[in-house]
Image (cartoon, rainbow, N blue to C red):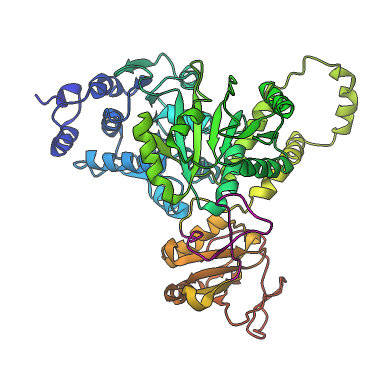
Amino acid sequence: MNAFEALGLNEQLVQAVTDLGFETPTEIQVKAIPVLLSGTTDFIGLAQTGTGKTAAFGLPLLQLIDGTQRHPQALIVCPTRELCLQITNDLENFRKHNKNIVTEAVYGGASIMMQIRNLKRGVHIVIATPGRLIDLIERKAIDLQKVKYVVLDEADEMLNMGFRDDIDFVLKNTINRESTWLFSATMPPEVRAISKNYMENPKEVTVGKKNSGNVNIDHQFFVVPASQRYEALKRLIDFNPGMYGIIFTRTKADAQEVSERLAKSGYEIEALHGDLSQQQRDKVMGRFRSKNLQLLIATDVAARGIDVDGITHVINFELPDDMEVYTHRSGRTGRAGKTGICLSICHSRESYKIKSLERMINAQFHKVDVPSGKDVCRKQFFHFMDKLMQADVSHGDYETYMPDLMEKFADVSKEEVLQRVAALEFDHFLKYYEHADDLNKSDIRGDRRPMERTSGGDMNGSRKERTSFNRGNSGYTRLFINLGTKDGFYKASFLQFILDESDLKKEVLGKIDMRDMNSWIEIDQAAASTMIKAIDGKRYNNRTVRMNEADGGFKRPNDEGGRSDRATEGRKRIYAPKERRSFK
């Protein structure tokens, strides 16, 4: 009998793994597959990457799925798009002899409209990253009511990346699941908390040593253009509202400038550098140790001797020139048995440094996308709700004011009160991030355009793109379209929208300038006519969409409502739609 067949797998799956050249199951597969095939047992598998975890849960899932029922029956949640695609590819190989089972990968950075269309056609297994899955749930594009099996893969990494609220949200929306399977390389308290809250008498299996390797610190890096380094830093801070951390810069000028910019935006931060007197240094460190400061920004020289417990994050605003310095920076977190996270903001030409660091400290670095503006707002919102629910009302004579409060809000519904509270707390976040750029795009060509320094000098590596279009030698042309932010678009969704409709690749696009009622798109001259032909003349929100070349003195159209007007001097009137609809 085949070794995989002895585990209880059916003939189709055994043949598939045999075709792939697998003869002997790994330890995690031997211990997990017989348990998971029951379909009713919660399971925790502790194993390092590369031990065959995907087959350990993927093969049982494929055997448990009812191919005649075309709806999501299993949900696999993983931290990154790369892992999402890897799992999907493995499942495709495993189902080689059973084409009735349909899988769908949903993750950020790909067309959400295409993913929604595929989900509507009917799928059995959904493999998802947390952010995109939440997006689909909120759009009511995916129904999780009939999901029987939920798999959390790389659970510790998802928590390190700040997806705890998202995981809670997903598990609360899969109320009819029959079993939950959790796979993780380590078992920090946060992962253990999930098992206690959502799993019933789980079977726990460990392969190898628990917490082997450098498990106290999770090393993550983000690749952005040099001009967006500060914006990436700000977004990472906002995405981790409970952060208590140190930011490292190369120079004291950078430390001072970043500190001033963040402080001006309302962050509790101070700079520590060589220009401070000992008295000033002691005052800053006293505030940081007492947690009156959320963040400390420092140079390597100034940070020597800092020994503060409880630091959750270390952020490298720039990687150090001396790779040995990295170990001293990252070692500020993950102390006394606690876990910590070290985040590094990198330029695309610094990939060799990451590889050198991996070899030097014998730890894997995880490439992570900078969170979108929408992700930041959602994270802040859930964090605020948690604080609101945990607020201590046992102290203080609140009863004295209750009659006045009840009278004041007598005619106001609970929903309206909550909306007003949320508006007071989040108005500044929504305004700042509503139309935030996708910092992970490589197509904007921010590093290849002519650059100019910002007035008054700028921090190291921080430069500003020219706002004018150099059409004469760039090979780009500029298109006008009468759609804008009032049509419900923000830059990321608008980008996906025009690419979906035109079937073009994002590499052909340059800068996108969005306004309330219209937008301008920089596009490769060779692709301009294709986009115009695909979009111009279509109907959107009961009006005609107009797209044409905006070069040669094209003036901004009037932002007016009303019925279609005649073309006047090459312009069209723009309509303000009442609700967003799709093209017909």
Residue 13: give x, y in percent of width and height: 19, 34
| Quarter-of-image position of residue 566 | bottom right
- At 17% from the left edge and 35% from the top edge, which residue is drawn? 17
Residue 521: name its quadrant: bottom right
- Place of residue 63 in the rendered image (x, y in percent of width and height, measured from the top left): 26, 31
- Residue 539 location (% of width, % of height): 55, 70
Counting labels gives 0
User: Would residue 460 be seen by someone viewing this image from the given angle?
Assistant: yes
Left or right position of 5 against 300: left
In the rendered view, would you say 453 is above or below 155?
below
Q: Is 84 on the left-hand or right-hand side of 556?
A: left
> Residue 363: which quarter of the image?
top left
Query: Residue 164 colored magenta?
Result: no
Q: Is residue 165 visible?
A: no
Measuring from the top left, give residue 372's x and y in whole percent.
Answer: 55, 46
Q: Is residue 497 above or below residue 144?
A: below
* Frontmost residue, 150 versus 50: 50
Residue shown at 55%/30% (left/top)? Answer: 313
Kindly identify the residue that appears in the image at 68 percent across and 36 percent down: 275
Toward the viewer: 502 or 144? 502
Q: Is residue 454 magenta?
A: yes
Query: Quick one: quadrant of the N terminus?
Result: top left
Q: Which residues are magenta?
A: 443-468
Judged by its main secondary structure, the magenta piece is loop
Rendered view: 512 above or below 392: below
Does residue 187 appear to the left or right of 13 in the view shown?
right
Residue farthest to the left?
1
